[in-house]
Amino acid sequence: MKIRYDPDADALYILLRDEEVAYTKEVDENTVIDFNKKNQVIGIEILFVKERNPNLLKHFQVENLISA
């Protein structure tokens, strides 16, 4: 599992399986789940992380993405 955080987008992505995304399902306007062809969850994206829960990132070891 890898957890990546993009500070510019304030988006957290939790990668559970390094597989091709077959489809994506929106849970709410700020959360989406990626699935593989076997309908297994392979990733979760959460938007507005700091806005929704400012302390959330303290609980994870995240890989920060830096925009070029």
Image (tube, rainbow, N blue to C red):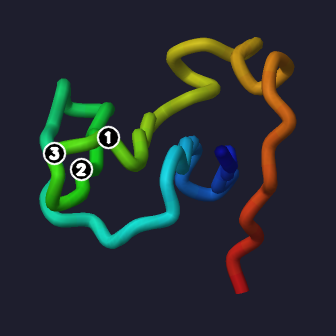
Residue in the picture at 76% in, 26% down: 57
- The quadrant in which the C terminus is found is bottom right
- Residue 54 point in image, percent of width and height: 70, 16
7 or 21, nearer to the observer: 21
- Whole-angstrom CA distance, mark 3 to mark 1, is 7 Å
30 or 18, nearer to the observer: 18
Horizontal relation, residue 45 to residue 66: left or right: left
Q: With respect to residue 21, does 1 lie above or below?
A: above
- Disc 1 secondary structure class: strand
Amino acid on which the number 1 mark rests in the picture: Val
Q: Are marks 1 and 2 in contact (CB under 8 Å)?
A: yes
* Residue density around tag 2, few if under 14, some if 14–19, many if 20 or more, within 10 Å: some
Q: Which residue is mark 2?
A: 35
- Residue 55 point in image, percent of width and height: 76, 13
Using the image, tell me which numbered label, if any, was put on residue 51.
Answer: none
- Residue 23 point in image, percent of width and height: 13, 58
- Disc 3 secondary structure class: loop
- Whole-angstrom CA distance, mark 2 to mark 3, is 5 Å
* Residue density around tag 1, few if under 14, some if 14–19, many if 20 or more, within 10 Å: some
Horizontal relation, residue 26 to residue 50: left or right: left
42 or 14, nearer to the observer: 42
Q: Which residue is mark 1?
A: 41
- Residue 49 point in image, percent of width and height: 56, 29
Residue in the picture at 81% in, 17% down: 59
Give the label, 2 or 3, closer to the camera. 3
- Whole-angstrom CA distance, mark 1 to mark 2, is 5 Å
Q: Which residue is mark 3?
A: 39
- The quadrant in which the N terminus is found is top right
Q: Are marks 2 and 3 in contact (CB under 8 Å)?
A: yes
